[in-house]
Image (cartoon, helix red, strand yellow):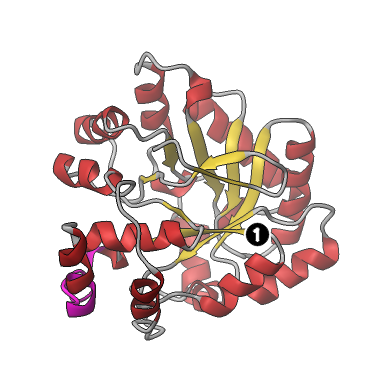
Amino acid sequence: MNQTVQAVNGVNIPQLGFGLYKIKNGEAFEQTVENAIRSGYRHFDTAKIYGNEAALGRVILHSGIDREEFFITSKAWTTDLGYHATRKAFELTCRKLNVTYLDMYLIHFAGPHYVEAWKAMEELYDEGRIKVIGVANFGIRHLEQLKKNARILPMVNQIETHPEFQQNELYDYMVQNRILHEAWGPLGQGSKVLLEHPELAAIAHAHRKSVAQVILRWHLERGSIVIPKSSNPQRIQENSEIYDFALNGEEMDRIRRLDTGKRYSVNPAGLMVNPVYVTFMKLFIPR
C-alpha cells in the first residue's frame, strides 16, 4: 500500500487510491471511508460534483491520523472554470475538506475556459497550495492546447481505463510528455462481462486471485495510478491485496489483446459539445 509513482515535479503519489464517486453522504459514507482507512488506503479521490468533500474531511479529521499521511485529490467542476471562478472553487473545496492545501487538484472536464482555469491552477501550485496539478477526461487535443498556453504542463490525466478500453494512443502520448496516467472506472464500473471474461478468469485462477485483483494489478504494472471504489468491506480489503503477485509478460500481452475500444461511460468529449448537457450543467448543478 506504500507503493508510489513519482510526478514530474518529484512528488510521490500513492499508486493505489480510493474513489468516492457515487458514494453518498451519511453514515454509510463515513463507514466506507473508515473501512478503507483501516485497510490501509491513504489516497482518496473526491470532487466538488460528488457532494462528499465535507464528509471526507470529517472522517479524516476524526481518524486520528495526521493530515500529512493522506493524499487528497479533488476537482474543479465545469461550471467553475475560469481564472477567478477556479480560484474561488478551490478555496471552497479546501474549506469543505477542512484543509489548507490539496495534494492534487484536477480540472474535471475540458469545458469552456479551461485554459484560464489552468492559469489559476499554476498560480495555486506556485503558492504551495497544491502539490500536484492535473486534469481529468482530457484528450490529446486538449493537452496540446494547454501546451501552447501553459507554463507548467499537467502532471496527471485521470481518464476512464480498463482492459476493454485501454486508451493506448493517449497512454503513449502521456508517457512521452511525462504526464501520469490515472485510471478511473478501472474495473469497467463493475461490468459483469469484464469481471467474468474467460481470459481474465484463467489468469486469475493461475494466481489464485480474483479477476478484479488481476485487473488492478494490470493497471499497476502499466505504471498507472488506480482508484477503485466499493462500499463492500470485503471488496475494499480485496482490492488492496494486489502486492503479493505480479503478471508476467505473456499475461500482460493476453490482457493487451482484450482492448475493444468499449467505454462503460459516456464520451466526455461528446458531453462538452452537447447543448442540452451544457444547459443542464448551468441550471441544475449546485455551485
Q: Is residue 129 above or below residue 246?
A: above
The residue where tag 1 is placed is 179
Q: Tell whether 236 sits left or right of 129.
A: left
Query: Mark 1, residues whose alpha carbon is within 10 Å: few (<14), some, or many (≥20)?
Result: many
Residue 99 location in percent, x, y?
55, 24
Q: Image point 36% across, 35% down: which residue? A: 41
Between 8 and 142, the residue placed more toward the observer is 8
Q: Quadrant of residue 140?
A: bottom right
Location of the N terminus by quadrant is top left
Residue 241's spot in the image, x, y percent? 27, 45
Relative to 48, is 24 on the left or the right? left
Q: Quadrant of residue 36?
A: top left
The residue depicted at 44 percent of the width and 74 percent of the height is: 166
The kind of residue on which mark 1 rests is Ile
In this view, 37 is above or below 146: above
Which SS type dominates the magenta stretch?
helix
- Residue at left offset 48%, top offset 63%: 222
Asked where in the image residue 178 lies, by quadrant, the reply is bottom right
From where the camera sits, is residue 23 visible?
no
Answer whether residue 195 is magenta in the image. Answer: yes
Q: Which residues are magenta?
A: 190-201
Q: Return the x and y of residue 91 as percentages of the image width and height.
A: 62, 32
Local secondary structure at mark 1: loop
Question: In the rendered structure, does residue 155 fall within the stretch colored magenta?
Answer: no
* Residue 249 visible in rendering: yes
**Residue 160 to residue 29: above or below:** below
Question: Would residue 248 appear left or right of 122 to someone viewing this image?
Answer: left
